[in-house]
Amino acid sequence: MSAAPDRAVRRADAADAGAIGRLLHDFNSEYDEPTPGPAKLAERVRQLLAGGQTAVLLAGDAPDGLALLRFRPAICSDGLECYLAELYVAPQRRGRGLGRALMNAAIELARSEGADTMDLGTSEDDVAARGLYESLGFSNREGGPDGPLSLYYEREL
């Protein structure tokens, strides 16, 4: 799961929870989203990793980026569905292929875990992320390029 040394990707374990918590906190802070802070995020990540339905990939030495994947049983197949819950690269490392390395490793990991689909959500104005996802074959059109636009909805409960 690695590329060039500056874009090396590895699967995280519980010992990486502090770094993951820091990256998730930075991500939420950068986009003005609420965050419980790095320590609470780290503790939650430890719990999720221990549960076996969550995987995190880390890239860069610091680490400088992450992909957080959630797995669930599929309804229409015997496989799994993989949800890319988070993809984040620290601002100072963007534009150097780290996001693409994380995404390629995430797709590889999802396949190796038995997933037959991967889904994600992003905002309309995140042109860089949309370009990356589309270049890797993700689509927001049902049934092909001429199909209706897929929409993602969410709400707080």
Image (cartoon, grey):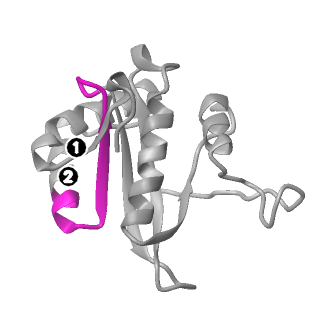
The C terminus lies in quadrant: bottom left
Residue 37: tell me if it is visible.
no
Left or right placement of residue 61 versus residue 50 in this view: right
The residue indicated by pointer 2 is 44
Q: Position of residue 46 (x, y in %)?
A: 15, 53
Residue 115 visible somewhere in the drawing: yes
Q: Quadrant of residue 60?
A: top left
**Residue 86 part of the magenta segment:** no
Residue at x 38% of width, y 55% of height:
69
Name the residue at 23% across, 67% down: 52
- 62 shown above or below 38: above
**Which residue does the image show at 35% across and 38% down from the upper left?**
2
The percent position of residue 36, horizontal first and vertical second, equals 25, 40
Q: Which residues are magenta?
A: 47-63
Q: Secondary structure at mark 2?
A: helix
- Disc 1 is placed on an element classified as helix
Q: Residue at x 59, y 35 (%)?
A: 129
The residue sitting at the right extreme is 146
Image x and y of residue 89, in percent: 41, 28
Q: Three-letter amino acid code at disc 2?
A: Arg
Q: Which residue is mark 1?
A: 41
| Quadrant of the snapshot with the N terminus | top left
CA separation, marks 2 and 1? 5 Å
Q: Give the side of residue 150 with respect to residue 17, left or right.
A: right
Specify whether residue 59 is painted magenta.
yes
Q: Nearer the viewer, residue 52 or 36?
A: 52
Can you name the residue that lies furthest to the top here?
92
User: Which one is in front, 97 or 33?
Assistant: 97
In contact (CB < 8 Å): disc 2 and disc 1: yes
What residue type is disc 1 on?
Answer: Leu
Q: How many marks?
A: 2
9 vs 141, nearest the viewer = 9
